[in-house]
Image (cartoon, helix red, strand yellow):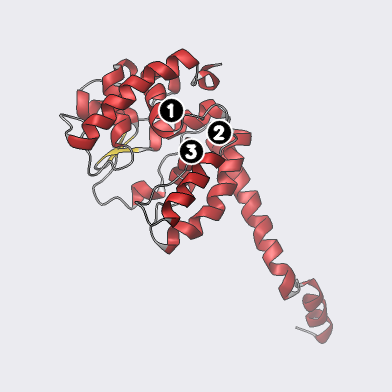
Amino acid sequence: MTTAAKTRARKRKLPWYLRPLKWLLWFVTISVLWVLVYAVVPPPVTLTMLLDGNGITKDWEGLSDIDRNMVRAVIAAEDGKFCSHDGFDRDAIEQAIERNAKGKRMRGGSTVSQQTAKNVFLWQGSGWTRYVRKVPEVWFTFLIEKIWGKRRIMEVYLNVAETGIGTYGVEAGAQRYFRHGAAKLTPREAARIAAILPLPKKREAISPSGFTRRYGNTITARIGQVRRDGLDACVYN
């Protein structure tokens, strides 16, 4: 390479302090395109599934083929403000921070939108990796709220959420526990699936006992409240 060519190459090369902006632009572009694709295409697999040593059992079902009781159960159990927030329940986040600061049992304030962003585009993680994940999680939550909308968020969540050991999505969960599809879940069945979502590898939807049984009964009762108050209206309107 001649001296003149080397000089031109140095001029074209970005200064070191501008390189992070270039990487950020690439990240934004790729992430937006990724979200746009998944707005119409079912996510084929997630990092959580790939890292699951128990295998993957899943069966994608459109929201129209999932009983409304399941949607109501998820809202009742996971995110009562799903239809009214912009992806983030600030009251729940503040309460979680206060609780965790007091040294009580760790409890998150994640919405269904945040959980969907995490499940589809990121990793589960624990310890310090959990906090590293929070920054891109906020970005992807913002994107899916703006690009997908509530119906698509709920549809994807119900198809990628872990519902048992090596089992993903409510269709596979319904088949595993109740021997029929998610299209005809009773309120009690939907509530039992919703009750195990936080700890799908440790809780049982069939003949649950202790906390899981009580929690399932509570969710069953709350399903009626979701129906009466129209807390699932954004999913169907």
N-term-proximal mark, 1 vs 3 = 1
Residue 94 appears left or right of 76: right
Q: Nearer the viewer, residue 230 or 27?
A: 230
CA distance separating discs 1 and 3:
9 Å
CA distance separating discs 3 and 2:
19 Å
The answer to whether the residues at label 1 and label 2 have Cβ atoms under 8 Å apart is: no
Determine whether 192 is above or below 91 in the image. above
Mark 1 residue element: helix
Determine whether 225 is above or below 13 in the image. above
What crowding class fits label 2: few (fewer than 14 Cα within 10 Å), some (14-19), or many (20 or more)? Answer: some
Q: Which mark is residue 75?
A: 1
Q: Which residue carries the number 2 mark?
A: 39
Q: Measuring from the top left, give residue 130's x and y in whole percent.
A: 44, 57
Q: Measuring from the top left, give residue 107's x and y in whole percent.
A: 39, 47
Residue 101 appears left or right of 220: right
Return the residue found at the far right: 4
Q: Nearer the viewer, residue 127 or 25?
A: 127
Mark 2 residue element: loop
Residue occupying image coordinates x 79% and y 71%: 12
Q: Amino acid at mark 1?
A: Ile
The answer to whether the residues at label 1 and label 3 have Cβ atoms under 8 Å apart is: no
Residue occupying image coordinates x 68% and y 56%: 25
What crowding class fits label 3: few (fewer than 14 Cα within 10 Å), some (14-19), or many (20 or more)? Answer: many
Q: Amino acid at mark 3?
A: Thr
Could you tell me which quadrant the C terminus lies in? Answer: top right
Return the residue found at the far top: 228
What crowding class fits label 1: few (fewer than 14 Cα within 10 Å), some (14-19), or many (20 or more)? Answer: many
Q: Measuring from the top left, give residue 20's x and y in whole percent.
A: 67, 66
Q: Nearer the viewer, residue 14 or 219?
A: 219
Q: Which residue carries the number 3 mark?
A: 111
